Image (spheres, rainbow, N blue to C red):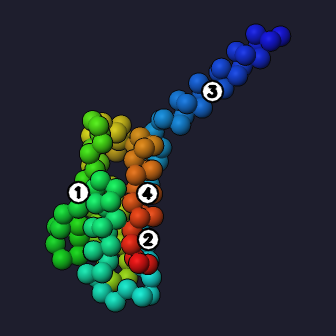
Amino acid sequence: MQKKWISFLMLAVVSFLLTACGVKPIHEVESKVVPNSIENSDQVKQAIKRAGMGLGWIIKEVDASTLEGTLFLRRHVARITIPYSSSQYSLLYKSSEQLDYDEEEKTIHSNYNGWIMNLDRAIQVQLIH
C-alpha cells in the first residue's frame, strides 16, 4: 500500500514539473492604460526604458512611438515590440530563440510569460513614481 502511495506521489510531482516547465499560450500586454498623471509619451518611454533596464532588457528606439526590447538569459533570447503613447503601451511578441515558440499554436516556454508579466509590473511601478 505504501509503495502505491509513493508511486502516485512521484507521478504527481513529475507531472507538475513537466507542465510547469512546458509551453503556454503566449502572453501579450495590449493597450495597457497609463495613469492619468502622465502628461506625455516621453514619460511613458522613459518609464519603459527604466523598467526594462532594471530587469536586464535592452531597450532601443525604433521610431517616435515604438521601442524594441531584447532579453538575453543564458541561451534564451526574447524580442518584443513596444508601441506606446501618452495614454497606453503594449508588450508584443516579436521573436525568440530557444523558447519553443510555436507560431501556429501561439505557444511559448512558460518562462517568457513570466518575463513579460515582470516587465509589465515594473513599468507600472515606474509610471507611478
Alpha carbon of mark 3 to alpha carbon of mark 1: how far?
36 Å
Please give the residue where the numbered disc 2 appears in the rendered image: 125
Q: Residue at x 27, y 74 (%)?
A: 46
Label located before the other in sequence (1 or 4)? 1
Please give the residue where the numbered disc 4 appears in the rendered image: 118
Determine which quarter of the picture holds residue 128. bottom left
Alpha carbon of mark 1 to alpha carbon of mark 4: how far?
15 Å
Quadrant occupied by the C terminus: bottom left
**In the rendered view, would you say 107 is above or below 43?**
above
- The answer to whether residue 82 is visible is yes
Q: Amino acid at mark 2?
A: Val
Secondary element under disc 2, as helix, strand or loop, is helix
Q: Judge from the rendering whether residue 27 lies leftward or rightward of residue 7; answer left or right.
A: left
Residue situated in front as seen by the camera: 38 or 79: 38
Q: Amino acid at mark 3?
A: Val
Q: Amino acid at mark 4?
A: Asn
Residue situated in front as seen by the camera: 121 or 15: 121
Secondary element under disc 1, as helix, strand or loop, is strand
Quadrant occupied by the N terminus: top right
Label located before the other in sequence (3 or 4)? 3
Please give the residue where the numbered disc 3 appears in the rendered image: 13
Q: Residue at x 45, y 64 (%)?
A: 121
List x then y, in percent, for residue 64.
18, 77
Q: Residue at x 34, y 56 (%)?
A: 55
Quick one: label 3, few (<14), some, or many (20+) residues within 10 Å?
Answer: few
Q: Residue at x 23, y 61 (%)?
A: 59
Alpha carbon of mark 3 to alpha carbon of mark 2: how far?
35 Å
List x then y, in percent, for residue 5.
77, 17
Please give the residue where the numbered disc 1 appears in the rendered image: 58
Secondary element under disc 4, as helix, strand or loop, is helix
List x then y, in percent, for residue 8.
72, 19
Alpha carbon of mark 3 to alpha carbon of mark 4: how far?
26 Å
